[in-house]
Image (tube, helix red, strand yellow):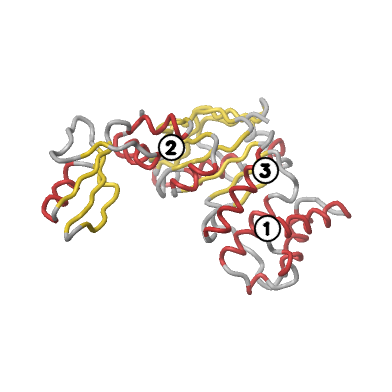
Amino acid sequence: MQLEIQHLTKRYRGGKLGLGDFTTDIGPGILGLLGPNGAGKSTLMRILATITRPSSGRVLADGVDIAGEPDAVRRVLGYLPQDFGVYPNLSAVEFLQYIAALKGLGGNGTRQRIEALLDEMNLATVRTHPISSFSGGMKQRIGIAQALLNDPRLLILDEPTVGLDPQERVRFRNLLAHLAGDRIVILSSHIVSDIEAIADDIVIMHEGRLLARGTAATLRQAAQGRAFERTADTARLDDLKRRHIVSRVSRHNGGWEVRYLLRDGATPEPGSVGVDATLEDAYLVLTTSGPA
């Protein structure tokens, strides 16, 4: 499958911009959407999942406009929204059976698929327990399982690692790496480390617009030569925050160890040491400065 996103714009009531002239192509592999809350990630994903219609622009799935023919995407779609809800009185297996029925799935193959997904999500031992007894992370894993029921060619996951503990996040990353293959996987997060660990390709979004796209390595170049560290007292720390983009502060010998990024046109502070840029540095530079 190939998605072509052409000049996609979404305005809500009152004129609030959800997306602004967003254009890109998406092919098989894992694409990470990275941006702060309100960047337009969920709006884009809801349009791709045919839940929301754009104000202008279009999305083509293998050449078919999904606004006019939404079934072109819906029959091959797996979707986990950010505000995913469950039926708390159903057990895990009952819930997945219910979702399978809504998707028009049935038979022995579906029952076997449900059991395999419960095992893959480490939920097999609680398959008959009511979902109301599950932790937040377990509920998130049920959400991921329901998105995979129809073995989708397009998998859209909005903030899928919310509520997962570190061990579960590692398991989830391994699962996605296994799933990717010849399907499109799109996931969003405002957590840089999650996207960097999972995604082959990364889109950085801000205020509804595409700021940059590339691998983690290529995106880091946006901050190369702009990342510095130095120690500072409280007064100097306040000055650094006014003049630069401070990305990390930690206690150090009664003062502070500060990592900061140069704003456009700025020069490093005396006593600073240049350090290698990270993806988080690039993210902060781009969302503060604008398009690359």
In front of the other: 206 or 239: 239
Q: Secondary structure at mark 1?
A: loop
Please name the amino acid that badge 1 sits on.
Met
| Real-space Cα separation, disc 1 to disc 3, in angstroms | 13 Å
Badge 3 is on which residue? 178
Residue tagged 1 = 121
To which quarter of the image does residue 287 belong? Answer: top left
List x then y, in percent, for residue 217: 44, 32
Disc 2 or 3, which lies upstream in sequence? Answer: 3
**Quarter of the image containing the N terminus?**
top right
Front in this rendered view, residue 130 or 262: 262
Dot 3 crowding, Cα within 10 Å, few <14, some 14–19, many 20+: few
Q: Which mark is residue 204?
A: 2
Give the CA distance from mark 2 to mark 3.
Answer: 24 Å
How crowded is the residue under tag 1: few (<14 C-alpha within 10 Å), some, or many (20+)?
some
Identity of the amino acid at label 3?
Answer: His
How far from the left and from the top, in percent, is residue 152? Answer: 71, 43
Query: What amino acid is labelled 2 in the image?
Result: Ile
